[in-house]
Amino acid sequence: MTERIGVYICECGPNIKDAIDLDEVVKFAKDLEDVVLARPFGLLCSQEGKTFIEKEIQEHNLSRVVIAACSPKEHEHTFRKVLEKSGLNPFALQIANIREQCAWVTNDKVLATEKAKALISAAIRRVVLQEPLTERQIECQSDVLVVGAGIAGISAALTLAQKERKVYLVEKLPSIGGKVARYEDLFPSLECASCVLDPIQDEVLHNEQIDVLALSEIEEVLGYYGNFIVKVRKRARFVDVCSCIGCGACFEVCPVKVRNEYNEGLDERKAVYIPYPGSLPNLAVIDKEHCLRFNGKACSACQEACPFGSINYGEEDTIEELKVGAIIIATGFDLFDPGKVPKYGYGTIENVYTSLEFERLISSTGPTEGKLLLKNSKPPEKIALVHCVGSRSMESNEHCSGVCCTYLSKFAHQAKEKLPDVEITQFFSDLCLPGKEAQVFFNKVSSNNEIEFIRLKSPDSLDIIEQGGKALVRYTDVYEEPKTAQYDMVVLAPAMVGATDAARVAAVYDIAQGKAGFFSEEDTTLYPVASSMEGIFVAGCAQGPKDIGASVAQGQAAAGKILSRLVPGEKLALEAAVCEIDEGLCSGCKTCIGLCSYNAMTFDDKEKCVSINEVLCRGCGTCVAACPSGVIKAKHFTDRQMFSEIEGLLRYSS
Amino acid sequence: MPKKPKIAFYWCSSCGGCEESILDLAEDILAVVEAVDIVFWPVALDVKYKDVAAMGDGEITATLINGAIRIDEHESMARLLRQKSKLLIAHGSCAHLGGVVSLANFSEREDIFTRLYSDVPTVKNPQGLFPKSGTIDSGNYLELPGFNDTVKTLDQVVEVDYYIPGCPPTPELIKEAIMAVLEDRLPERGAVLAESKALCHTCPLKESKPETIRIKKFKRLYEFEWDPSRCFLEQGIVCLGPVTRGGCNARCIGANMPCSGCFGPLDNVTDQGAKAASFLASLIDSTDEEELQRITASIPDPAGLFYRYSLASSMLKGKVAGNKSD
């Protein structure tokens, strides 16, 4: 059958019209094989343009359409819809990008015109070989798993929890709230953190659509977007969640003292404990690793003390299987360990703290109940705040965490509020105060308080040594002068990095992990919360450093992505241009299996060949390039189509 | 008695291995001789070119030509045999894809002559004599076949009906091809008469091949003590089994050697060498530019390795100027 191709050339206002000789391009395109007509038009993506093409397709009985306009990234979907509306398969369209690739790359009209002709010739040669494709649909689960009950995970869960869907909110710690629960005040409004967090934590715990699984971790994930099967290990709490009221009788009698991780090790807790006053759910938990009873000793102090008979040493871990359609990973961040860079004296010099430790020191629920004290219980007189510890440096982490400059301003404000006479010095090399709030907050804090700012030559042109029980900061300032100054407290702002167990998490979900341990997003600009696996989303600081507002926004964004695609009772629409394998010709060499980023290839042990799961496949074509037998076909990107396109490009005659 | 079908064999630029492969039919050759008349076979029978020229068009049922097209004599004989044969079968890697001899396309004609007749240390050529197509000796004009600019496959010169792959093909494949001709059960014209799946499918080591192979260095057999019971690729040894048509009975693998690709590409592959490079690249375990270069540098003579049997038929074609494409 002879094809009937219509070629439409967009003027794109003056963008294309002024840069390319459109009369010549039209004349050229008209005479090419299978071309029925070639026409210029003012603005094809406008309503008039779309209606024009639609009418043309019907009037001239076109079978294929070539549009010479802007990048297909911009309007391919627009014109595909036009084709569909006119009764053509949307894949009967090919776009020649004569704007970004011709008009915008040269001022030479002759060259731009020639290149436009070549691209149109290529598009015509390709479009005749394009095959009609149809969107596929599958049954799906609309329930969602959210991993990590920090602010991002909670926000996602609350956005998702609607009448007809269930959300499983899984948290590995005994309580929810994440890092935010450890803060006293939040910048920029200096709102109290628990005032922000408590109501939404409460909402999560009482929402019937949300199942909170604390002390739980995901062990295995099988399946694909729309149909995941997830295995959750619920670790034994050894405390009956129904009868425990968190009264604290048990931990008062517990003889074991261990490092209190919630207070960053600044004080101790018991082996049976509640993470912090007001932690939710308000339930005690036994730390099996340290409890005497689980270490072969005969202790049952807590059981004896519990007025409700809630202690159950016989409780065992349980494995629960969940069926969900999508997963949001919001497992948060950790701070870069400044102990890794000995010059900061962290861990060796007293009163050198990380920012998280300072958060606890200043917190009313912290080890000093909010009193800002040195190790010797005296208030500090001089505090140094050190920016960019382990960040913006090629040796540790290249990135900027983007929040430290703001929270160090908060620290300065908090310290001054507690100790008006304290002297504060900030060591920085550059300040990062983005957005509409941070600079304003910084200005306010800096003008209200006398804070010394010392600009360093570079983020790491500073070290700290001990001098007479105090910290001596030795630095080179921006004027390249080496100087020293003594402080009795130093607060380091270490880089935010991926959570310490991020690699394990990445392996469980088979998602990509990028620099500094954060999970990689599919596309920084357009798909910031999509992971490398379809149906698995990343939100909050697990994806990269960000402030609380941005974490909440990502949690809600990920939830929104899911709500819009996984609708209860509806089928899931899948990408049409995926890869397919001719199983009868596959030699079973397995080359493709390890290469697939989406786990779409499986080896059929019986047939000794590979099959592709079309739900998981995104049509990226990696397997196609690698398949040594050439039996995997990327729909819409076949060898024939591409060779033909290249031939069209190389063999056009001007 | 009905007339027996006529069969002819001819060799062009080849090493003789394909002729050997016919002899390797051993006693089976007697069955072939029983069933057919061999009317032309320069290596074994004294039949002259003029005898062939005297045959009627299409008189020969099938002609098997091995060797690549190197000199104009090959070209004219290929044309003559095409005319006289109902079926023309490319026999062996050289006729099929260019073979080892087409690696000459990485050198220009003049460079080949300079190397062979002057630069090779064991050659003494004080008069600077180089091959020519004609010369006068003692008053007589002597003519030699002309040396073409490039080596070509058989089907770049004449139409070919079927291909028997291999360097050399196995006797089993040759016998099967001849029987298919005699019993009139040939597949679609243009087919390669071997398996349609890659060697991996029938490789005796396939069970040891893991789902993921990551290579930090390509190793050669002499460099370490490798395990003959495990997949070569898994041990970092270049094996072209995945990118090569099966049907060879895994002869090399059985002899503890990795596949070097003589059965050529699969039906859906346009360029075996490019495919080999592309699939091997996909196994490399690095994202660092410098390390990647180091790893790829551990493949010796990649062009010669990947295109060992298929340069003339490839898209790469070689270095030689004047390669026409259509």
Image: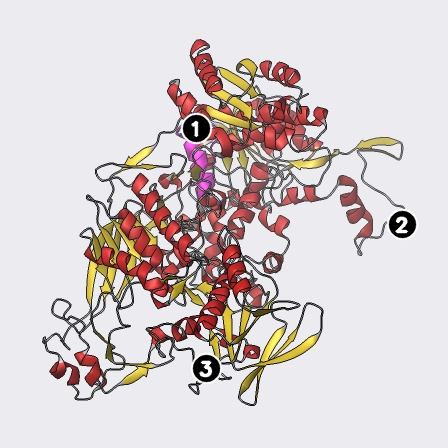
Whether pointer 3 and pointer 1 mark residues with C-beta atoms closer than 8 Å, the reply is: no
Q: What is the secondary structure assignment of the residue under circle 3? A: loop
Tell me the magenta residue range: B170-196
Looking at the rendered structure, the secondary structure element under dot 2 is loop
Cα distance between the residues tagged 3 and 2: 100 Å
Q: Residue at x 32, y 44 (%)?
A: A562
Is A485 on the left-hand or right-hand side of A57?
right
Q: Is residue B166 above or below residue B251?
A: above
**What percent of the width, then of the height, locates residue A432?**
55, 58
Q: Residues within 10 Å of mark 3 (few under 14, many from 20)?
A: some
**Horizontal placement of B35 versus A560: left or right?**
right
Decide: is A119 above or below A552: above
Residue B188's label in the rendered image is 1
Which label lies toward us, 3 or 1? 3
Judging from the image, what secondary structure is the residue with disc 1 in? loop
Which residue is located at x 69 percent, y 32 percent? A106
Q: Which residue is mark 2?
A: B126
Write down the residue under mark 3.
A379
Chain ID for label 3?
A
Occupied quadrant, residue B32: top left
Q: Residue B244 location, x and y as percent?
A: 49, 46
